[in-house]
Image (spheres, rainbow, N blue to C red):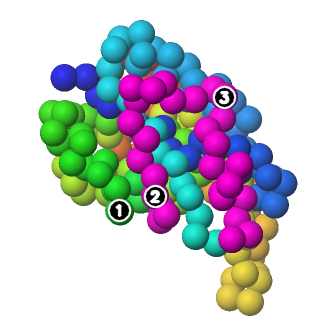
Amino acid sequence: MASALILIDIQMGFNDPSWGARNNPQAEANAGRLLAEWRKWAAPVCHIRHISTEFASPLVSEGTIFKSEVTPLDAEPIFEKHVNSAFIGTELEDHLTHSSVGDLVICGLTTPHCVSTTTRMAANLGFNVRLAHDACAAFASNASTTWAPELAELDPQTIHNTAISHLHGEFCTAMTTDAILAEGP
């Protein structure tokens, strides 16, 4: 069985300027490339949508719409979540298990939050994970200056790189989109 492609929270709400500076403007395009190939190979695809429980969040209403690069097809399952992990409060694990999927390719938004949490949990649940690090992105730190003033201005690339380095080798194999496409599902 092929690896399932898990596309995490690639939604219009992440275009909101309130998120601040962001790294990797090619993340959505790379995720779209992965999705196009997974569809060509007729390999399993799962879309994850974050619906915030906070009224003022950019991830409510129109902010929950998937970006055009990764718009789901009717037959592709969508799992809606309200927390960082795509496995909590959803049927994702059951869906993958009942589909005999043991290997995952994960990408999406944002690297240190929902991508990281889902990747860690996937590995803890026994899935073999390849993480398309260049199909993910992070935003600048919004750390509180009251507890760690030196962390308040971490740039998005540093945040992204740190998150990937914490995941690689322990919870996943971090790879480029091109390397994943060369291996196939």
For the residue carrying disc 1, how many other residues have a C-alpha within 10 Å: few (<14), some (14-19), or many (20+)? some
Q: Residue furthest right?
A: 17
Residue 71 sits above or below residue 7 on the image: above
Residue at mark 3? 68
Of callouts 1 and 3, which one flags the residue occurring earlier in the amino acid sequence? Answer: 3
Apparent side of residue 22 relative to residue 88 in the rendered image (left or right): right
Say what secondary structure mark 3 lies in: helix
Of callouts 2 and 1, which one flags the residue occurring earlier in the amino acid sequence? Answer: 2
Q: Position of residue 69 (x, y in %)?
A: 63, 26
Kind of residue indicated by mark 3: Ser
Residue 134 sits above or below residue 37 on the image: below
Q: Is residue 169 visible?
A: no
Apparent side of residue 169 relative to residue 98 in the rendered image (left or right): right
Residue at mark 1? 88
Kind of residue indicated by mark 2: Lys
Q: Position of residue 112 (x, y in %)?
A: 55, 57
> Which of 66 and 165 lies nearest the eye of the viewer?
66
Please identify the quadrant where the C terminus is shown. top left
- The residue sitting at 40% across, 54% down in the picture is 86
Q: Position of residue 53 (x, y in %)?
A: 58, 70
For the residue carrying disc 3, how many other residues have a C-alpha within 10 Å: few (<14), some (14-19), or many (20+)? few
Q: Which numbered circle lies on residue 81?
A: 2
- The residue sitting at 71% across, 49% down in the picture is 62
Q: Is residue 13 visible?
A: yes
Q: Which residues are magenta?
A: 55-84
Cα–Cα gap, marks 2 and 3: 20 Å
Q: Are marks 2 and 1 in contact (CB under 8 Å)?
A: yes
Magenta region, main secondary structure? loop
Of callouts 2 and 3, which one flags the residue occurring earlier in the amino acid sequence? Answer: 3
